[in-house]
Image (tube, grey):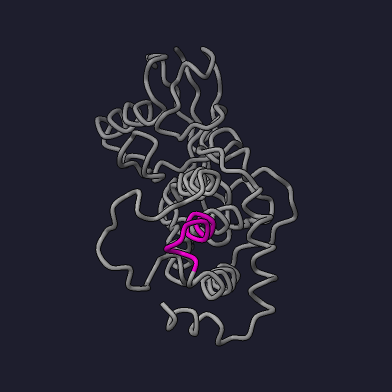
Amino acid sequence: MKITLNVWRQRDASSEGSFETHQLDDVSPDMSFLEMLDVLNRRLEAEGKVPVAFESDCREGICGVCSLMISGQAHGPESGTTTCQLHMRSFKDGDTIFVEPWRAKAFPVIRDLVTDRSSLDRVIQCGGYVSVNTGSVPEANSVQVAKENADKAMDAAACIGCGACVAACPNGSAMLFTAAKLAHLSLLPQGKPEHERRIKRMVEGMDAQGFGACTNHGECQEACPKLISIEFIAKMNRDYIKASLLPEHTSSELLKAQ
C-alpha cells in the first residue's frame, strides 16, 4: 500500500505546530497503525531526522495510551477500536491520512502526538476509589450483587481512560469518563458508603481541571473504544442532584456507621 501521511509536529505546548508530510510506499495492510508509525520513525532515524513522538504501551487495547486523532476521528475509523488495534487494511491504497494529538484544553501537547492527560488522574484523585476498611478480600459469593448491577458495573469499568471522549466532544467534556468511573463504584456494595461524597468531589474536580460541559452531543460514546454508553452520564447527573440536596456531613456519618 502507498500512504500519504500528514503528521502533526510540535516541539512543546508553547510552540506552534504544523503538519509534516511523508510518503510511505511499502505499508502492509496487516500492520497496525502504530507499526506503520514505527516504520516511519525507523526511516526518519536512518535519515538522521527526529522521529515522531507518540505514546504506546500494551498495544492490546487495554492501557489507553495510544491516543491519536486519525483523519478527524478519535482512534481512527473503526468503531470500538483503539489506535493500536487499528490495522492499515482499514484504509485504501493511495489514501491520505492526517494524524494529530488530542485537541482539548485540558490535554496540553507535550511533543508531537503526545499530550498530558494527567488531568484525568486528578479527577480520580478527587474520589475515584474506595477508602473504607472492607477487610480482606471476601469469598466471591459472600457479597450478593444483582446481576443487572454487576453487568452495568463491568460495562462502566471497561473505561481505559484514554481521553477519546474528551477529544471527540466539541466542548472538551470529560463527563463520560467521570460518569463511568463513578458508576462502576456506586453500583457495587463496596462503593456505596462514600457515594454522595465521591460524586460531589469528582464532578467538582472535573470542572476544576478545565473540562467543558456536556451538551448531549453524543460523540463521546461514538468515539469510545470500549463503547461506553452516555446512559452513565444521565445516571451521574441524577445522582449528583440527589447528593447536592443532602447535608454536607451525611457522607462522613455513613462512613462512621461502617
Whether residue 53 is visible, yes or no, is no
Q: Is residue 230 above or below residue 26?
A: below
Quadrant in which the C terminus is drawn: bottom left
- Residue under the point 58% across and 48% down: 165
At 25% from the left and 63% from the top, the residue drawn is: 136
Left or right: where does residue 38 sit relative to residue 168? left
Residue drawn at x 41%, y 52% as measured from the top left: 111
Q: Is 73 inside the magenta-drawn segment?
A: no
Q: Main secondary structure of the magenta part?
A: helix
Q: Closest to the observer: 51 or 125?
A: 125
Percent position of residue 81, x then y: 49, 31
- Confirm whether residue 169 shows in the render: yes
Q: Is residue 128 above or below residue 66?
A: below
Identify the residue at image location x=37%, y=26%.
36
Q: Who is closer to the viewer here, 162 or 68?
A: 162
> Percent position (x, y) of residue 63?
36, 44
Q: Which residues are magenta?
A: 181-192
Residue 186 on the magenta segment: yes
Image-quadrant location for residue 1: top left
Q: Position of residue 252 (x, y in %)?
A: 48, 83
Nearest to the observer: residue 74 or residue 134: 134
Q: Quadrant of residue 143?
A: bottom left
18 relative position to 44: left or right: right
Query: Who is closer to the viewer here, 142 or 37?
Result: 142
Q: What is the x, y in percent for residue 186?
A: 52, 61
